[in-house]
């Protein structure tokens, strides 16, 4: 039987009871596969890698070594909350690598979106591989592969052309070949979330909106600079806070700020104030192939605009993106 093919008889995991049965099965399978050996995992803090981490901690505890690489393109407080949840909450064996300066130095002056993606993806592997080399006795590599990833790789193998190079992590270098542990590889995203909740991960974490691998790097449009990236991070945090407060976070599939590399003239304290615009994008979709725009009440938009323009240094306008996909992709880059 092809272990990468979901059996037609496999029941969809929709309830805590079905999730508990799946977890028991996978805990036993992982213990059997791994024995007393060590397993390495790149823990981004996204839903898939977090659920894998929680599952493996349940199965093998400290035999799992998690590495969280901060590429400097995370949302506000994101790395801190990964550390808090896994190190403090689940007592994970977690290594934190702050590679912010390294990534931002490499990206300086690079404006082409695909080159930015390639640099971030390639460097991510390099930093992760460097950490892996420092560790001894690692036999396995765990990955948060889910069934749509497998279906997509099959399509790619058939030679279909992609609009953007979404795949973030390629293979590790030759000298680091581990056996894979992929406990979620036959699950769809909705099932991963049910399993995540059954493992005790917080609802807000398990149902969080998707976040691209290159992070804020594809939202700080054109060549990334530290000051514009910081403005984007702060504006994005305000947008998320207001969406949470107003019940939009649960309702809208993906929402974020993009900041282009242009400045307009404004006025502040009776003086000329040049600044960047913050562009709000909020979309709904089922499969990310097409998307519609969420209609955000004007009152909320006004409040967000006021907060961003008053609280974020460098931003002097707020714009709303009304473009569906197609013709606009969800991300600007
Ligand atoms: P687009 O912009 O192609 O986005 O309409 C569709 C979905 O994919 C996400 N996205 C990415 N995810 N690496 C990722 O992991 C990427 O390079 C990447 N680019 C876009 C995007 O956030 C949306 O959810």
Image: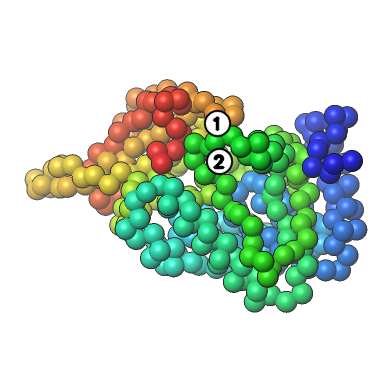
Label 2 C-beta lies within 8 Å of the nearest ligand 1 atom: yes
Q: Quadrant for the C terminus, please.
A: top left
Picture coordinates of residue 312, whole percent (x, y): 30, 49
Q: Where does label 2 land, which residue?
A: 210
| Furthest residue in direction front, as rendered | 159
Q: Is residue 8 left or right of residue 125?
A: right
- Sequence-wise, the earlier of marks 1 and 2 is 2
Q: Is residue 144 left or right of residue 162?
A: right
Picture coordinates of residue 177, whole percent (x, y): 72, 65
Number of the front mark, 1 or 2: 1
Q: Count the numbered circles shown.
A: 2
Q: Quarter-wise, where is residue 10 in the image? A: top right
Picture coordinates of residue 133, whole percent (x, y): 65, 74
For the residues marked 1 and 2, what is the alpha-carbon distance in whole angstroms? Answer: 10 Å
> Quick one: 21 or 34, which is closer to the camera?
34
Q: Where does label 1 land, which residue?
A: 288
Q: Using a 10 Å C-alpha cutoff, classify the residue at mark 2 as few (fewer than 14 neighbours), some (14 to 19) or many (20 or more).
A: few
> Quick one: 71 or 18, which is closer to the camera?
71
Whether residue 306 appears in this view of the structure is no
Element type at mark 1: loop
Q: Is residue 275 above or below residue 103?
A: above
> Quick one: 65 or 269, which is closer to the camera?
65
Element type at mark 2: loop
Q: Is residue 65 above or below residue 244?
A: below
Q: Using a 10 Å C-alpha cutoff, classify the residue at mark 1 as few (fewer than 14 neighbours), some (14 to 19) or many (20 or more).
A: some
Q: Residue at x 33, y 34 (%)?
A: 303
Are the residues flagged by discs 1 and 2 in contact, CB closer than 8 Å?
yes
Q: Quarter-wise, where is residue 265 in the image? A: top left
Label 1 C-beta lies within 8 Å of the nearest ligand 1 atom: yes
Q: Is residue 37 above or below residue 242?
A: below
């Amino acid at each position: 039987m092809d272990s990468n093919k979901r059996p037609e008889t496999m029941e969809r995991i929709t309830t805590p009871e079905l999730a508990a049965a799946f977890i028991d099965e996978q805990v036993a399978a992982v213990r059997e596969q791994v024995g007393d050996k060590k397993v390495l995992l790149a823990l981004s803090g996204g839903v898939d890698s977090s659920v894998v981490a929680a599952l493996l901690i349940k199965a093998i505890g400290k035999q799992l070594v998690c590495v969280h690489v901060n590429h400097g393109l995370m949302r506000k407080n994101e790395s801190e909350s990964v550390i808090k949840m896994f190190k403090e909450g689940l007592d994970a064996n977690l290594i934190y690598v702050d590679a912010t300066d390294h990534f931002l130095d490499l990206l300086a002056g690079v404006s082409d979106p695909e080159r930015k993606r390639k640099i971030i993806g390639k460097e991510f592997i390099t930093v992760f591989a460097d950490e892996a080399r420092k560790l001894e006795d690692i036999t396995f590599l765990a990955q948060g592969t889910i069934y749509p990833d497998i279906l997509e790789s099959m399509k790619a193998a058939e030679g279909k052309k992609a609009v953007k190079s979404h795949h973030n992590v390629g293979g590790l270098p030759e000298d680091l070949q581990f056996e894979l542990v992929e406990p979620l590889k036959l699950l769809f995203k909705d099932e991963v979330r049910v399993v995540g909740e059954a493992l005790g991960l917080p609802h807000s974490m398990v149902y969080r909106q998707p976040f691209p691998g290159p992070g804020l790097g594809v939202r700080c449009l054109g060549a990334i600079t530290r000051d514009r990236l910081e403005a984007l991070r702060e504006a994005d945090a305000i947008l998320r806070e207001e969406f949470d407060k107003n019940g939009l976070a649960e309702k809208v599939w993906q929402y974020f700020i993009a900041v282009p590399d242009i400045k307009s003239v404004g006025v502040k304290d009776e003086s000329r104030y040049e600044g960047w615009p913050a562009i709000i994008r909020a979309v709904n979709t089922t499969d990310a192939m097409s998307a519609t725009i969420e209609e955000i009440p004007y009152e909320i938009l006004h409040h967000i605009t006021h907060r961003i323009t008053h609280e974020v240094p460098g931003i002097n306008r707020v714009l709303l993106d009304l473009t569906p996909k197609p013709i606009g992709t969800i991300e600007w880059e």
